[in-house]
Image: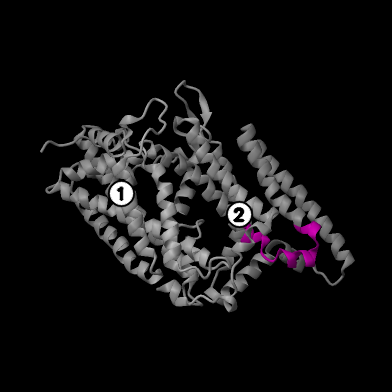
Amino acid sequence: QDEVSGTEAKEYFYQTIIGMDTLGDDLKPTRLVGMNVFYSLLTWVVIYFSVAYGLEATGKVTYVTMGFPLVILFVFLGRSLTLEGSGNGINEYIGESNWGIFSDHPEIWSRAVSQIFFSLGTTFGIMTAYGSHCKRNEPAFLNSCVVALSNSMFSFISGFAVFATLGHLAYLEGLDSVADLEYSSFGLVFGSWPVALGTLPGGQHWIRLFFIMLFMLGIDSAFSFMEAFLTVLHDTKLFHNVDRKRASLVLTACAFLLSTLYATDAGLIFLDSVDYYINFVIIFVGFVKCVAAGWVYKIETQIECLGSKIVFVYITTTFGSVLLACAMWFGVGNAAAGFFGLVISYAMGIAYVGYLMSKKKQEDQTLTWSDMLFDLTMGNVMKLREDLVSSVGHIPVAWAFLIRHFIPQVLLILFFLGADATTIDEEGNEVKVFGSYGGYATTYQVLGILTVVFAGFLVVSSLVFPKLYEALETVDETEKSIDKNNIDE
C-alpha cells in the first residue's frame, strides 16, 4: 500500500469526510452530509444511554472512556518516541523557547486561559454539578488541585507524543523544523497523526485506535456538559420531579438537532467560528462568577455595616479603573497611558472611599478603621469561605483574596485583550479578528458573536428582570419530593 502524505490526509478529511468539496467561494453550507448526520445520531444515542441511568452509571462508563485513552496515550507516546526525527520534535517542544511570542501576540494569554477553562469545565457548571454529588465535607480544595494538576499533566505528556510525531513527519517531508509543517487546528490532528501512525507496522489498526481514543475523549466532554445541565434541571422547582431518563432524552434529542448544523458541508467552519467566539463567553462567565462569589455574596450585610455609597463607590473604583486602563491599552493603544490611568483613577477612587469611611466613623463611634477596612475589602468573600468550609473542608485564605482582588480583574483584561487581537486580511490590511475571524462570511461571524451577546443577555436580564427566572429557583432539601434514586439510578 502506498504511503499517504500529510497534504493528502488533510484533503481527504476536509473534502471527503467533512464534504467541503461542494462549498462555493462564499463557503456557505449547501447540503447535509448524510454519513455525518448518522454518526452524530449514533454519538448522541451513546451519550443518552451513558447519562440517562444516573451518575453512578456514567461513572462506570467513564472508567472506560477515560481509562482507555490514557492507556493509548502512553502506547502512542512509546511508539512515537521510536520514530526517526522524533528527537528533533521533542527538542522543539521543550528544548527551544520563543518567549517573545507572548509580547508579539499577547492574545495568546486570552486563548490559553479560555482553553484551560474549557479543558477543566470551569465555567460550564460541570465541576459544580459533580461536586454536588460528593459527600459532605469532601475535601474540595484537594480534589480541585488533583483535577487541575492531572489535566495539565495529561496535556504536557500528550505534547511529547504530538511533537515526536510532528518531528517524524518533518523528517519524512525533508523539512528542517516542525514549524515548517503546514498543520494547524483540525489539520494538526487529521493531517499528521494518520500519516505518522500509518508508517508503523499494522498502521491501519493504530489509526483506528487513535480515532477511537478521540471519540471517547469527545463523548467524555459531552457527558460532563449533559450532567451539568441535568443537575441544574433537577435542582429547580419546575423540573425537580421530571424523570431523569425523560429529561436526558429531551436534552440529547435537542442536542442532536442542533448538531446537524455541524453535519453540513460547512460544519467545520461553523464549529471553528463558534469555537473562537465561545472563548469570550468562557472568560465572561468566569468573570461574572468571580464577581458573584467575591463581591455580590452577602453584599446586603456589607451595606448594612458600611452603607451603600461606600460599597458601590469601592466597586466602581476597582472595576472602573480596570475598564479605563483597558480603554487606553486596547482602544487608544497607549500602554503607558493605560497604566497611568489605572493608578491615578484607582488612587482617586480609594481616596474618596477613605473620605466616606471617615465620615461614617464620625457618625458611628463604635466602628473601628480595622473592622471597616476588613469588611470593605474582604468581609463578604471571607463569609463565603466560612460558609463553604463547613461543607467542603479546608479552603485557603489565598483563594478568597484571589477571587476578589485578582482573578476577576485579570479576566476582564483578558476579555478585552482577546477582542483587540488583529490579523492581516486577504487584501493585506490589518483588521480585528473579532468580527472577521478566519476571513469567514458575515453569517459565521454573526453566529459566533450572538453566542457572546446571548451570554451577556442572560446575565443582565437576570439582574434587571429576576422574575423571568423564578421557575429556575432551586428547591430546598425539605421541599424535594423526588426520590434520590431517581437521580442516581
Tag 1 and tag 2, C-beta contact below 8 Å: no
Seen at 56% across and 66% down, the residue is: 236
Disc 1: which residue: 39
x, y (%) of residue 192? 26, 40
Disc 2 on helix, strand or loop? Answer: helix
Q: Residues within 10 Å of mark 1 (few under 14, many from 20)?
A: few
**Along the line of sight, which residue is nearer the eye, 255 or 65?**
255
Question: Residue 288 has which mark?
Answer: 2
306 in magenta: yes
Q: Is residue 215 left or right of residue 28?
A: left
In the rendered view, tell whether residue 48 sits above or below residue 333.
below
x, y (%) of residue 65? 31, 61
The kind of residue tagged 2 is Val
Q: Quadrant of the C terminus?
A: bottom left
Q: Which residues are magenta?
A: 291-311
**Along the line of sight, which residue is nearer the eye, 382 or 348?**
382
In the rendered view, tell whether residue 425 sits above or below residue 467.
above
Question: Residue 356 has which mark?
Answer: none
In the rendered view, tell whether residue 319 sits above or below residue 380.
above
x, y (%) of residue 50? 35, 63
